[in-house]
Every structure is written in structure tokens, then in C-alpha cells.
Amino acid sequence: MIPNCKHTTELMSQGQDRALTLTERMRLNIHLLLCTRCRTFTQQLSFMRTALRRYRDGA
């Protein structure tokens, strides 16, 4: 079963705090192949993490 967008964004968020299982990663990747909006969300999440890391490190 391929997760919907809500479940996918929850998995992406959880993946920031813990290692996802193989099944979770597979479902996430399949969904991301099919969903432009969730791919965009992934890029935005990555941008925010990078920006916060730079702010924290004083760069």
C-alpha cells in the first residue's frame, strides 16, 4: 500500500528523529516518485534543516 500525502509527510518528519524501517523507506520513496507536492515538501524540509544548522553554527 502506498501512503497518502499526510502519512508521507509524517514519515518524512519521523525520519528526521529516527531511522525508518525498510518498508517505511520503500513506501516513502514510491510515493515521492509519484507526488510532485511531496517532493517539493522534501526539498523545503531539507532547506530548513540546512538553514537552521547554519544559524546554530553561527555561519
Image (cartoon, rainbow, N blue to C red):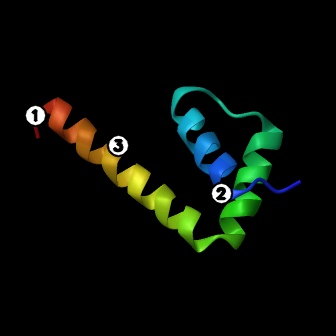
Which amino acid lies under the numbered mark 3 shown in the image of this protein?
Arg
Which amino acid lies under the numbered mark 1 shown in the image of this protein?
Gly
The crowd level at tag 1 (other Cα within 10 Å; few <14, some 14-19, many 20+) is few
Task: Name the residue carrying label 2.
Answer: 5
As drawn, 37 above or below 3: below
**Label 2, label 1: how far apart the Cα atoms are:** 34 Å
Q: Given this view, does label 2 or label 3 mark the residue nearer the observer?
A: 2
Which label belongs to residue 21?
none
Q: Given this view, does label 2 or label 1 mark the residue nearer the observer?
A: 2
Q: Reading the chain from its start, which is encountered first: label 2 or label 3?
A: 2
- Quarter of the rendering containing residue 53: top left
Helix, strand or loop status at disc 1: loop
Q: Quadrant where the C terminus lies? A: top left
**Label 3, label 1: how far apart the Cα atoms are:** 14 Å
Q: Quadrant where the N terminus lies? A: bottom right
**Label 2, label 3: how far apart the Cα atoms are:** 20 Å
Residue located at (82% from left, 57% from top): 2
Which label belongs to residue 49?
3
Q: Is residue 51 left or right of residue 10?
A: left
Q: Given this view, does label 3 or label 1 mark the residue nearer the observer?
A: 3
Q: Is residue 51 left or right of residue 22?
A: left
The crowd level at tag 3 (other Cα within 10 Å; few <14, some 14-19, many 20+) is few
Q: Residue furthest left?
A: 58
Q: Nearer the viewer, residue 52 or 35?
A: 35
As drawn, 52 above or below 18: below
